[in-house]
Image (cartoon, rainbow, N blue to C red):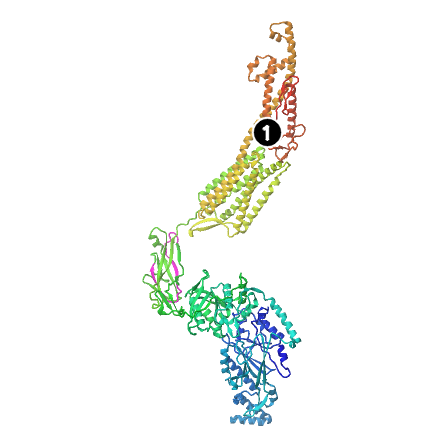
Amino acid sequence: VAYARHLIDTEQEHTTFIQKFDKKSPFVNTHELQWVVNRLILNGIFGFNVFISNPSLLLQNSIDSDVSSRDISDLQTHDMPLLLSNSQIPPSSSWSLYTKSIHFDESTGLAIANIADEDVPLYENQVDAARGILNVIAKINRENRCYVNNNDDTTTTTSYSDYLQRFQTMIDQLSMNDTSSTTSQINETENSGEIPTLPDPNSALLSSTEDDDEQKPCWISVLLYQDKQDKYATFLQEITKHIHPPDIIMNLEESYESYPIPQLYNDNSTTTWVGTCPMDDDVYCQHSITTTTTTTTTNNNGTKLRHRKVTDIQFIEHDLEELPDEYKDPIWYDHVTQLRVLANDAERNNPTIGFTLRMPAVRDGEIRYCQAGECAIGNLFTDALRWYTDADIAFVASGGFKGNGWDAGVVKLDYLYSALQFPNTECVGKMTGISLFRMLEFVTRIVPFDAIDSDEGDQLLQVSGMKITYNTRIPIGTSRLIGVEVLNKETGQYEAIERLKLYSFVTDSYLCGAYLRYPEFTGSALVLPGEVPGVIGDDEIIQNMVANFLGQLDEPYDTSTQGRLRNNTNAFEVLDLLQSKEECPQNTVWNAEQVTCLPCPTFENVAFSDELLEYQSENNAMERQLGRIVLVNREIFDVSVLLKSKPRWLGFTNVTNNEEVLDSSSTIELAAGESIAMQFALNPSNLLASGTDRSAIASVNFGVLGGDADANVGCVGRDVTFEVALRVMPADELNNLGWIRYVGFGLFGLVMVTAMAFALWVFRNRQTRVVKILQPVFLMCILMGVLLLSSAIIPLSIDDGATSQWGCDLACMSIPWLLSTGFIVSFCALFCKLWRINRLFNGAQKFRRVVVKMQNVVAPFVAIFVLNVALLLTWTIVDPWKWERREIDNQKWNTYGSCRGSGNVSIVMASALGGLNFLSLLLSCHQAYIARNISGEFSESTYIGIAVYGWMQIMLVGAPILLLIDEGNPTATYFIQVALVFIVSMSMLLLIFVPGFINKKKIAASQRDMSEKTHFERSVRQQSKELSKMAVIESMARRTSFQHINNIETSSSPDVSQTFQAQPVPEVVVESLQRIEESSCDSDDDSSESSLNPLEAARARKREIEDKIQHNMHQSVNHNILGMADGDSRIMIDHDGAGDGDEAPRHHSNGMMMETNDMEQQQEGSSRSRRLNLLNKRLGKSFGIGIGDGSSTSNDEGGTDKTDFTMNDSA
């Protein structure tokens, strides 16, 4: 534009700009507007009012064609229409309102037409289109009183213009005469039937507008030509011979330079100027056209005509790489600023997409490398297409590739657009080896492989996934295809093409939908079995596929040739996959449409509508049953069907009268695509008469023959069959529980009686020490839970043989309620019982006082119970179990009933409840394990552990057994379920309550021992009093005896006893001695003591009492005394090792002692301590014995040792 402003004298010269549409530059393809940016630049910035392109642009709007996925509707505008002269644009095309065939530029007087490529959709023959355009321009010039053709003056007048001249003359005459005369003249003229001779139309009709005509231009016709060089020469020869030849023909193709200097065509023998000024991206080309001034001439009729012709054309070219500084004016700076903004936007959309080795140029002047054979850019695009679609093979046409390649290293997105400008998408399908051969044979037949730009060379296919071998020494136009190998994706090896093997293919949407014969090869010609015509996608353009392909590579893409297109000039044996009828071997059939020998028909497409028909007859119902089946012929030829065999209890009948109509001699003719319905009758009586079986499966066989008898020589037919199963139903088998339900009732009764007996035992002994220790509240909860758990046997025993459907539904839903609630109540109560004991004894071991109340341990029980009820309510409301009958092995007569839910909620709820019950079991196991070392009097953990682990084993074994049992065996399922419930319930009762009963017996015996001990202590106290008295009596007796002895000695009496007895003894002594003598009667050796005198007897009794006291004291102090009261329990530990006062510390065997809140027991213990101290003092004073700290002392008075009894820790 800057060149034009400075090279053109705007006062003397007029200018028009013809800009070619840019669709290949990196800038256009990477800008966010993409192709639409042409409108912004050409019309918005530079103000151009027209642009040119080739016809392929008409297919690049997604709303017009599947070839492209790009929306370029914004490119279409009346301010800058497309100039395209050799295309037939239908009204349905979006371009119909935005395209014109001729651009009349008023400033220059040029009528410009664009003759572009042909051999594309919507194209018109170049010569025919140019002739029509030149005729239109000539007609307009005629209307503008311009000289059109100096060799044919007759073209300046036509019948229409001649009549128009005469009509205008009549109007002029009427205006000069009055109305009457005019009317008379018209009437005379009409009556005579003659039209008066009129002057020339150019002088008469147009005389009033000559001044206006002088302002109308005489158009110079200019044809811009864009096509191959071989077509250009033919076009010049044809169009210059036209009656209205063009004034100028400009070749814009950059691939060749014919007539580089403008000149008259054919050595000045025509008036047409020709020249070539390629529209190169790097060259500014200006056509300076000089025309003669408008002159006036007169034709044979004297009409004034203007004549304008071209006298000279000069081409002005400048390199666009460097613009002279003097041309960089403010307008240029403004344009550059706007373009720089657009360029920056494009650069941001131009990322690095991958790496390759050096990519060679596709074109170099007139050389087209991809038209000569394999080229690297073709390998890249086809590899990307095959990778993206996972197809077996890929191919694209070579004509679309352009560009100068790029250096090794990074690859940007604009590189791909410079190589292939069109935003085509993929087209995928399937073709056999035959169809692939046809396409490749056509390509190698027409392509010259000479790297010279041509329409045939453009059709050469660049491929991936296959290798093509050809021989260019074989004359063009004949078959030159030597071999085709296709890559096996599984083995990675290339294998020879197979005629009937299916290959998935991918190509671009333009080749598949618009390019010459390729839509036929990839679409309509794919008619063989399994072939799929190409389907155009619309989700991704090819350039983006290539970008994704390069991005996923771990190393730069190898741009070297891979031997995919090989020219073997030494091989002359061409590949031929097409066959003739005469070549068909045995067991094959000739198919003229497919031009191949196909295997003999297998009649696989002749088949019955069903393979197996099943019928059932009720028991004792012997009437015939009717059946129906359809025989379909889906082959492409007619067939004959013959009945071969059938069972004796089946016969084919007439639809109306049920008479048998088919036998072994009957034949059915079926045309291609036809079907026939056959009716048959089944006779159960014949089945039962044939034997004892109540069911049978038999085949019905038909032989199939058909097709062309001549073509199918050597082919054999096949059998088509269907099977019929007939079963005479036995009596209904409901598989109800029957008598076994009473076994379940009995087991439940046994559990209930046992539970009630234990409940009665707990109630009656609730105040006893053993029951208090076992915690009666939790015992009653366990009993209640066991009753609920075992009561599930009742609904398990109910089926529809015992009650109604409603009753069965109610029983079904009560099962999980009873099982889950009973299990939770039992095990939570057990858990709380063990938890309470563990907390008490764990606190004692840590030397701290712990108070465990009932509400402290009930909380977990309540939480688990509430969650259990919530789950059960949800289950009951949303998806309750209902009684449902199902068939066993699809036998309608053999059914069983079970409880099932209608959805998945019941499964979820059952799983959740199972998990909750298992959690309670685990918690009980854990607490039982913790309590394993606690005395069995307080925690029956040993038995509970045995029970819990036994239950876990029962569940782990019982659950798989239930799953393994056939669901069609309800009796076995019921037995296992009842057995599991009974075992769990009964074992819980026995293992918890029987040990308590045994402990109660042991504690009763222990209490009897304690009673005897208490009796002994009372006797010891009584005897201690007597010993005190005896000490006094002994002293008095000693003194009395001494006195008597003295008296005897004084009296010198020989009879001592008489003397002794004769002395008076004090009454108190006598009474004491009598009491001692009476008490001594309890001694084991009465005879030995009877001979003793009273004093000796008293001393012997004293020793006896001392021995007895010592023996009983040893038994007493070694007996553990431990008491526990109802209500809250407390543990008191003396950290200093001693109790209150002077009392020795008292401990349990585990280092602790349980105290009670019972004040009476505290007072009794205090009184007992005082009595023991008193007894100790009395024994020490009277007899020299006592209870002390284990030391030994000497009695000063009597000289006897005092023995202390040492008490152990249990005292």
Query: x, y percentage for residue 637?
Result: 38, 67
Please identify the quadrant where the C terminus is shown: top right
Residue toward you, 862 or 1097: 1097
Query: x, y percentage for residue 525?
Result: 44, 70
Residue 634 in magenta stretch? yes
Instruction: Name the residue carrying label 1.
Output: 1120
Q: Tag 1, which secondary structure?
A: loop
Please identify the quadrant where the N terminus is shown: bottom right
Residue 1107 in magenta stretch? no
Q: Amino acid at mark 1?
A: Asn
Residue toward you, 1088 or 46: 46
Quick check: can you spot residue 996?
yes
Q: Residue at x 57, y 12 (%)?
A: 1091
Magenta-highlighted residues: 617-645
Query: x, y percentage for residue 1050?
Result: 65, 5
Q: Is residue 850 left or right of residue 719?
A: right
Residue toward you, 714 or 1106: 714
